[in-house]
Image (cartoon, rainbow, N blue to C red):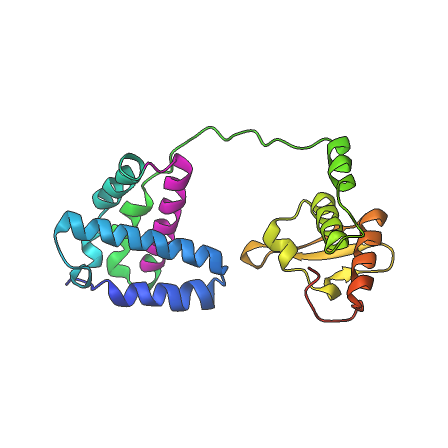
Amino acid sequence: MSTNIALPIRRFFEQHLVAERGLSQHTILSYRDTLKLLLTFATKLLRKHCEELTIEELSADLVRKFLADLEKTRRNSVRTRNARLAAIHAFFRYLATVDPRLLARSQSVLGIPFKRYVRPVLGYMQREEVINILGQIKRDARYGRRDDAILRVLYNTGARAQEIANIDVPDIRFSRPYLVHLHGKGHKERTCPLWPETMTAIKSYLQERSTKPTDRTPLF
């Protein structure tokens, strides 16, 4: 008995990724793009319309050919190839849990390994370089205090850009010890201490905005 692919994909996105795993919108869109590319590749390879595809036709061999095509035709890097494979793994891991008939097929796809690659060594700026950048900001200009506060929070916490965008004013502890509560990927949360210089910049920026520490509004 063949399994039409439409319903499992819809439930994977609408129920599993959102309701059960609570993944970020960015991750969900990445998974969507991966499955879109996979289905497009499968329709061309099998010479079938997308609505005619079945789960059984998405074999491990087809997935391997898809990954090879990503690197050869689309010129994707190994890192991108691995990210696409991670999304495919997530889909087949879901299938294995909702339909035991698909367990063996899912295991064969889950057995496809990630490619190894040399991770580039991340560079970093020296303290003097950061101070020099902060010194270029015109704090009396429009958005000057905001830019100063953003850069200081970034440097102080090492937070991702999205984590900075997610900060609300009440996430800041304005009394000693100064802290900020960060909301990261996958609903992960962490608390970071803030330096006095960072807190001074935040307070100056909020004063300019006439924002109170209790106001439920984005910090930036």
Place of residue 165 in the rendered image (x, y in percent of width and height, measured from the top left): 63, 57
Question: In the rendered structure, which segment of residues is drawn in magenta?
Answer: 75-95
State which quadrant residue 209 falls in. Answer: bottom right
Residue 204 shows up from this direction: yes
Predominant SS along the magenta part? helix
Residue plotted at (78% across, 55% down): 179
Place of residue 16 in the rendered image (x, y in percent of width and height, measured from the top left): 41, 64
Quadrant of the image for the C terminus? bottom right
Please state if 136 lies on the left or on the right of 66 as rendered. Answer: right
Place of residue 55 in the rendered image (x, y in percent of width and height, measured from the top left): 22, 57
Residue plotted at (38% across, 34% down): 115
19 versus 23 height, above or below: below
Residue plotted at (27% across, 68% down): 7
Please state if 218 lies on the left or on the right of 93 as rendered. Answer: right
Residue 93 shows up from this direction: no
Of the pair 59 and 83, the residue shown nearer to us: 83
The residue positioned farthest toward the bottom in the image shown: 215
